[in-house]
Image: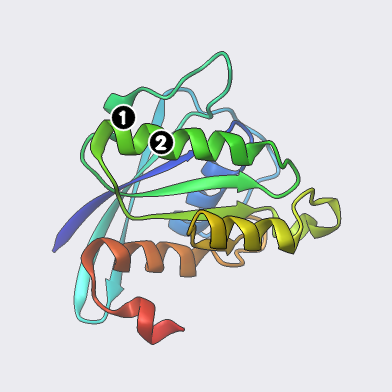
Amino acid sequence: MIKKKICMLGSFGVGKTSLVQRFVKSIFSEKYLTTIGVKIDQKTVQLKNQEVNLIIWDIHGEDEFQKIKSSYLMGSSGVFLVIDGTRSNTIDTAEYLLDLVEKSIGKQPFIVLVNKCDLKEEWELSNEDMDKLETERSWQIIKTSAKTGEGVEEAFKLLTDKMIGTGFDEVSR
């Protein structure tokens, strides 16, 4: 079995912990709990004939008072950059964190998750904004909802494929 470390990165309150809980335990809670430091979960996924044990590092939110330590990133095979669709300023944090990843451990497979698609009527991000991120920055974006589960399983499988290269990405499209 292959083991791969994934880091969940983003601003505070974007839904990193909720996405992990939806993926690992198939649950969602309305209660907001701030992550302090790092919370580590695991889940084994099957891609084609390959079992992959994902070790998911849910790292505290980045803000002006609390910066991500580059040591948390060491050993990562892939990264999720989580953006809150209801807060467009979370894009700036994602850009900063991607730069931190590349400076700390080099280029890694990553996917941008635009979370809270269940709150679409409250979104500050438009489809044009996301198209611009995809074309100008070459970001692969998946819209997710930790509440409904939309896009969550797909996102983890796509990132796993990017890390181990099973060809799942081509098959799933």
Which residue ends up furthest to the right in the rendered image?
121
Of 46 and 121, the residue lying toward us = 121
Task: Residue under label 1, please give it.
Answer: 72
Circle 2 SS class = helix
Task: Residue under label 2, please give it.
Answer: 99
For badge 2, the amino acid type reads: Asp
- Label 2 neighbourhood size at 10 Å, few (<14), some (14-19), many (20+)? few
User: Measured from the top left, where is residue 109 in percent x and y?
Assistant: 33, 55
Of 164 and 118, the residue lying toward us = 164
User: Measured from the top left, where is residue 65 in percent x and y?
Assistant: 56, 13
Closer to the eye: label 1 or 2: 2
**Vertical placement of residue 48 versus 27, above or below:** below
For badge 1, the amino acid type reads: Tyr
Question: Residue sitting at 15 percent across and 61 percent down?
Answer: 2
**Vertical placement of residue 159 versus 81, above or below:** below
User: Measured from the top left, where is residue 99 in percent x and y?
Assistant: 41, 36
> Along the polypeptide, which appears first: circle 1 or circle 2?
1
Determine the image quadrant of residue 136: bottom right
Which residue ends up furthest to the left in the rendered image?
1
- Label 1 neighbourhood size at 10 Å, few (<14), some (14-19), many (20+)? some
Q: Is residue 10 visible?
A: no
Question: Residue sitting at 64 percent across and 63 percent down?
Answer: 131
User: Measured from the top left, where is residue 98 in percent x and y?
Assistant: 43, 40
**Vertical placement of residue 143 versus 71, above or below:** below
For the residues labelled 1 and 2, the Cα–Cα distance comes to 15 Å
**Vertical placement of residue 10 versus 159, above or below:** above
Circle 1 SS class = helix
Which residue ends up furthest to the front in the rendered image?
136
Looking at the rendered image, the quarter that the N terminus falls into is bottom left
